[in-house]
Image: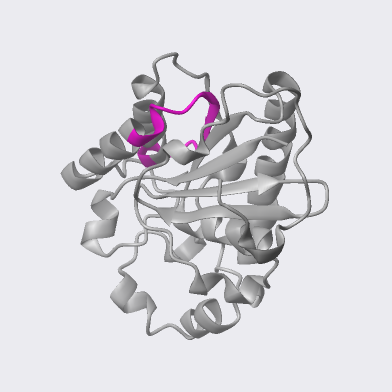
Amino acid sequence: MATVLLVRHGRSSANTAGVLAGRRAGVLLDETGENQVRATAARLAGLPIAAVVSSPLERCQQTAEAVVAAQPRPSPLHTDERLTECGYGDWTGRELKTLTKDQLWKVVQGHPSAAVFPAGESIRDMQARGLAAVREWDVRVTQEHGVEALWVAVSHADVIKAILADALGTHLDNFQRIVVDPASVSVVSYTPLRPFVIRSNEQGDLRGLAPAKKRRRRRPASSDATLGGGAGT
């Protein structure tokens, strides 16, 4: 199967204001966020990206456009509603310091699989749609570009954390243990037996993800873990 690079959008004006932006329109990257996504796009520019798929929200679109623009051969930019932010409902637009006093906050922190936002979405449903999107795009990219293809999914912290929790084989209640910083890159390779989490919250060099230039024959991705850890990618 292909390999997905999960990119979180850069820092937004809502992040710095301590506000839960949710799906509210007009939330854009701040100056730091713009610099972050340019740096991430530059790190991705050395990789043969087959496709870029993004949440429809502006901060993700800005991030995805920067990634595409930095590619020597621009990849197609697609939008998938299933990668959008969690539907926080009545919590949308409220200050985080106020939300921490709500009883639901304790559920979100300690038992997120049971959390349903008032007039919004459950975290469980958010995970299900995000996973469906990534799995379906992974199959599509593999069919169109081969098993060594790399592609980018630009989304939001909670969506990416939920996808990583699934890839790690951990319960959704543990997804708050995963950190996904603005403009970070996390990498998952799906195989017939299990996913492999290759990178998480990466801010450094990504050139090691590039497929080998010459191979005697193409081999399908192995589902076997290497005993002893292997020599690395």
Residue 169 position within the rendered picture, expressed as x and y whole percent measured from the top left: 70, 66
Which residue is at the front of the view, 197 or 23? 197
Q: Position of residue 17 (x, y in %)?
A: 22, 60
User: Can see residue 2?
Assistant: yes
Viewed as shown, does residue 6 lie left or right of 70?
Answer: right
- Residue drawn 75% across the image and 40% down it: 221
Q: Residue at x 24, y 50 (%)?
A: 13
Q: With respect to residue 123, does 33 lie above or below?
A: above
Residue 43, image quadrant:
top left
**Residue 147 belongs to magenta span:** no
User: Vertically, is 32 above or below 176?
Assistant: above
**What residue is shown at x 65% (from left), y 30% (from top)?**
148
> Residue at position x 61%, y 65% from top?
123
What residue range appears in magenta? 43-59
Seen in the picture, residue 15 relative to 23 is either above or below; the reply is: below
Q: Residue furthest right?
A: 192
Please state the horizontal and vertical placement of residue 107, each as a whole percent of the image: 55, 82
Residue 19 rendering spot, x and y as whole percentages = 30, 62
